[in-house]
Amino acid sequence: MFNSRFVIDLEREMERIGVSPEGIEIMGKKGKFYRIRMDNIPLKGALLLKQEALAAGMECALPWCTASLTCDSTSAILFGTERQFEILIGKMKKQPFKGRHIAEDLDKCITNGKKIMTVHAGDYKISMDSFKIMGILNVTPDSFSDGGKYMDVDSAVERAREMVREGADIIDVGGESSRPFAEPVSEQEEMRRVLPVIEALEELKVPISVDTYKPRVAEEALKRGASIVNDIFGLRNEGMVDVVRDYDAAVVIMHMKGEPKNMQKNPSYEDVIGEIVQFLRRQADFAISKGVDENRIIVDPGIGFGKRVVDNLMILRSVESFRALGFPVLIGTSRKSFIGNILDVEVSERLMGTVSSNVIAYMNGASIFRVHDVKENVQALKIAEKVKGAFA
């Protein structure tokens, strides 16, 4: 009788029924709902946070120890509308017991989630107003998916050209396999593999990324035209942050538990998302403290790097948590073993699993997708982009 239905695009639907622009601006914030977890809040600050959250009409979930006064610090989960968070943030700025810091952290989390970012990589400026594809170019004999296919410069360059024609925005060149249980190669061997290819790719006029955790390899690659360092060790190796800074490169800071040769030996987490966020925040702050501009930082939660299947699935559901750090999020699911485990298929049959996982990650806030199969992922993400844009 009344044609009742759920509303997806609240502000557009209000406009359609004739709500005034002023009313849309006011009520739109009441229709946006956030759930935010915070850790390490001092007990007295948490009690004030609870009080002000309830006064704003929202909720603040605290553990029992805060009621029994048996903990010095605590975690909290807040949930409410954007407007309620605005009220809470304004009130907490005036409160003691780290109230101002709590308010600033909440404000940054919400603001970062809405930012459209631009990555500066050498002379390139890569806007995240649309998804970006990073095409994988492994010049290795032993990568899990395409090892040995592009070992000579000519075949590697031709493959890179093909990926650019298919829609790749970035080419990621790697000379050492990071598959589970892989053994490292020497600097000299890695440079022998990647440097001639990187030099030859200058003609493509797209940003070139070097997939390495070795500072010397990164520096020599940047000298030859690369403008991004894709570091699976997340700037943990001494000297890498200095190389990134000195060459005005962009950097992908990735989370990995352990290293390739041992990362998949019974990995476990108490709070996988919390641990990854904490690591990425710490390493991004470290990079900035060393002089790397924040617009040169990309974060990668490291799907498949020291993760169980359930961890990888949780990452795909939780991309917004990484986006709230204020940096573009790169996702690399391409042909990985968790897809094979779920679908019970070999590497050569993991395309559909890759595409579907990337679409899910995109809808949840990821910006950059590292893939082997460029054309198919571009097509799928264009559809997802149109669907998402229809409600922007």
Image (cartoon, helix red, strand yellow):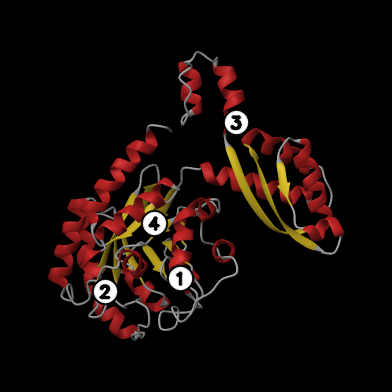
Residue type at the position of mark 4: Ala
* Label 1, label 4: how far apart the Cα atoms are: 32 Å
Tag 3 and tag 4, C-beta contact below 8 Å: no
Q: Nearer the viewer, mark 1 or mark 2?
A: 1
For mark 3, give the secondary structure.
Answer: helix
Q: Nearer the viewer, mark 1 or mark 3?
A: 1
Q: Taking 89 as reference, is 157 above or below it?
A: below
Residue at numbered disc 4: 121
Relative horizontal placement of residue 244, taking residue 162 as reference (left or right): right
Residue at numbered disc 1: 308
- The location of residue 313, given as percent across then percent down, is 44, 60
Query: If you read the primary sequence from the N terminus, does the residue marked by circle 1 or circle 2 appear first?
Result: 2
> Label 3 crowding class (10 Å Cα cut-off): few <14, some 14-19, many 20+?
some
Q: Residue furthest right?
A: 69
Q: Taking 37 as reference, is 1 above or below it?
A: above
Residue type at the position of mark 2: Leu
Q: Nearer the viewer, mark 3 or mark 4?
A: 3
Q: Residue furthest front?
A: 1
For mark 4, give the secondary structure.
Answer: strand
Query: If you read the primary sequence from the N terminus, does the residue marked by circle 1 or circle 4 appear first?
Result: 4
Tag 2 and tag 3, C-beta contact below 8 Å: no
- Look at the image and tell me whether residue 134 can be seen: no
For mark 2, give the secondary structure.
Answer: helix
Residue at numbered disc 3: 29
Residue type at the position of mark 1: Arg
Please tell me which residue is depicted at 46% across the width and 42% down the height of the picture: 116
Residue at numbered disc 2: 195
* Label 3, label 4: how far apart the Cα atoms are: 35 Å
Query: If you read the primary sequence from the N terminus, does the residue marked by circle 4 or circle 2 appear first?
Result: 4
* Label 2, label 3: how far apart the Cα atoms are: 51 Å
